[in-house]
Amino acid sequence: MENMYIMKVAYDGRHRGFQSQPHGNTVCDYIMDALMECDYSDDKNSIVFHGGRTDKGVSATGNFVIAKLKREPNLPHIYSKLKNKGIWIIGYKKIDEIPKIEYRHYRYVLPKLYGFNYDIDLMIQCSKRLIGTHSFHNLSKRDRTKKKSSIRTVYDIKINNYDHCFIIDIIGKSFLWNMVRKIIKVLSEVGMGNKPLNWVDDLLDENHKEGVPPVPPEGLILVESKTNIDYIYSSYVLNRYKREWMEEYLKRVMKFEVCKNMMELI
């Protein structure tokens, strides 16, 4: 007899997105392959729900999948099949029904132009105007079917200012396609002085139509699709996850400093 399990998933952005696609090579495709290889499932379509759809290039620390499995999953066993694929199932829980998503939390790492002075106060003022319930038709990929409402509620936006980047956290019930990345673009343009503060008011006007390009997906992290689930975590998989990310961090810091020095030395 099969039971439903929710599994908390972290991944990097190397894959062709999160949700299963006909071309394969998505996070869900690799997870299903691992579950079938470990004999937890015989059905390629046993994933029945997920916490949030993310595009290629986007990473996550707290997405989830819900799948019907033959027995309780052993996370280190599954990890052995996902090793070196940039996917980690870090926690799980047996459930009787699909839990309600309370909110989704995204974080964007926005690098600063070298030597440029951003107006952080204007960025914060801009973020406050985006909080609340608005029509985000200009800040999402256009829905040509017009089946989805563009009305969404943003609960909070926090901007932390560091030497080389901004860390921007955005929390809301749900988001339209590309909405978070387009919000980041608006904050960046206002902070750089390329657009006035009242530009955001125009973008939120239901009668105003204006395209806004999204920032690159590589800076985006789905931090959490929050539910009331109390996951059972695997210390082994968490340790492997942190070790692998530390190795990647050391490589990137070295490359970052090389780039910085190459600009400063000439």
Image (cartoon, rainbow, N blue to C red):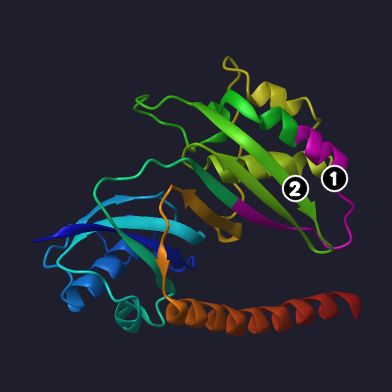
Q: Do the residues under discs 1 and 2 have CB atoms within 8 angstroms?
A: yes
> What's the residue at 59%, 33% (across, down)?
154
Magenta residues, start to end: 107-126
3D distance between C-alphas at marks 1 and 2? 8 Å
> What's the residue at 44%, 53% (across, down)?
54
Which residue, given by chain and number where applicable, does mark 1 sit on? 120
One can see residue 238 in this view: yes
Which residue, given by chain and number where applicable, does mark 2 sit on? 159
For the N terminus, the image quarter is bottom left
65 sits left or right of 54 in the view = left
58 sits left or right of 16 in the view = right
The answer to if 116 sits in the magenta stretch is: yes
Give the SS element for disc 2.
Answer: strand
Q: Is the residue 146 above or below the residue 23 in the image?
A: above
**Quick one: which residue is furthest to the left in this view?**
1
One can see residue 194 in this view: no
70 sits left or right of 75 in the view = left
